[in-house]
Image (tube, helix red, strand yellow):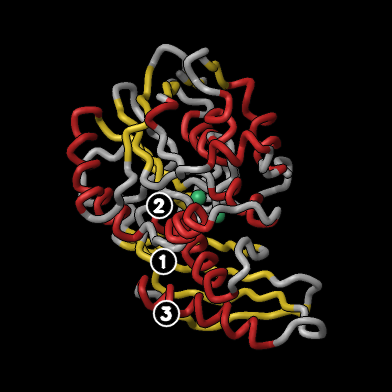
Amino acid sequence: MRDLPLISDPNLLAGIEHAEDAGVYKLSADLALVQTVDFFTPIVDDPYTFGQIAVTNALNDVYAMGGKPLTAMNIVCFPIKTMDISVLREVLRGGLDKMREAGVLLVGGHSVEDNEIKYGLSVTGLIHPDKILFNRGAKAGDSLILTKPLGTGIVSTALKGGQINPQLLEKAISSMTQLNKKAAELIISESNIHACTDITGFGFLGHACEMIENSDVGMRINSAAVPIFAGVQELVETGFVPGGLYRNKNFRIHQIEVAATCRAWILDVLFDPQTAGGLLFSLPGKQAQGLVEKMRTAGIVDTAIVGEVVADHPGKFFIY
Ligand code: CO
Ligand code: CO
């Protein structure tokens, strides 16, 4: 779609050109709108939980820009002829509870009849035009921090295959329903945040690649330091791998050099498509440990330094 004629405007501070998490439009010298939309088919069986996950996921792109979500609209596709309406009620109730927790107001929505249920939100938020966290801008010497474990795509594939350990499922659900609100507040309170994004469909390495594409820096990732849900290794080695993982891997593998110390199953997890994943951001190395400790104290317990930004292989990754 790259040749589609886009409309440019000096007030458009983040558009669709650079794979930003959300669009940002400047209203005045000290105020800008943040806008995003996301919806998808259920990845868990319980409708209330699905509603919570869908809303957490949709709000995360506003937090990834450093914005504060303000209002939202429901997007609903529902098979009214074959599914009981009470299912939809539970989905919307789960979504509303999560919006309430986030301090977001539901202002409307739209529903269509469809063969399969789908749910999500369009979200509008606010941000100061000088405080936008772009996904580009990482500098050599920065540390990379990830705030949630990886593996939700693998977990939902195993759930569909009927092969999921209940404790692992509970851990993954509790992560997918955890808003990135608190994490974003801690990040914003820090100076010198150079780049930030959230991990979703393209997986950890797909989104990390967007941070350095056509830039003058590269990244080194310590595979053993990346947080991953306990039990995911067994699922990968049994073959519960979503199709999107291989698509992500094939698309990006040419940018990545993998050392023998990186285990094969971890490399796969680094490409696993995530739902409502954590924030991935970069800041000067000397500030990193202090912020990780603040995050952990605030209950974002899996936060970890996963790598560093380097000048010696621009646009490329080294995974060890
Ligand atoms: Co995003
Ligand atoms: Co999005």
The quarter of the picture where residue 66 lies is bottom left
Split into 4 quadrants, where in the image is the N terminus?
top right
N-terminal label among 1 and 3? 3
Residue bearing mark 3: 105
N-terminal label among 2 and 3? 2
- Please tell me whether mark 3 sits on a helix, a strand or a loop: strand
Instruction: Tally the numbered discs.
Output: 3
Tell me what residue is drawn at x 57 percent, y 29 percent. 265
In the rendered view, tell whether residue 245 sits above or below residue 103. above
Q: Amino acid at mark 1?
A: Gly
Tell me if I can see residue 133 in this picture: yes
Q: Amino acid at mark 3?
A: Leu
Q: Amino acid at mark 2?
A: Met
Left or right of residue 6, residue 167 in this image = left
Residue bearing mark 1: 125
The quarter of the picture where residue 217 lies is top left
Q: Is mark 1 within 8 Å of ligand 2?
A: no
The one nearer the camera, 261 or 125, is 261
Residue 296, image x, y percentages? 24, 48
**Distance of mark 2 from mark 1, alpha carbons?**
10 Å
Tell me what residue is drawn at x 37 percent, y 27 percent. 307
Marks 2 & 1, CB-CB < 8 Å contact:
yes
- Please tell me whether mark 2 sits on a helix, a strand or a loop: loop
The quarter of the picture where residue 222 lies is top left
**Label 2: how many Cα within 10 Å (few below 14, some 14–19, many 20+):** many
N-terminal label among 2 and 1? 2
- Give residue 65's mark: 2
In the rendered view, tell whether residue 227 sits above or below residue 318. below
Residue 210, image x, y percentages? 52, 35
- Please tell me whether mark 1 sits on a helix, a strand or a loop: strand
Marks 1 & 3, CB-CB < 8 Å contact:
no
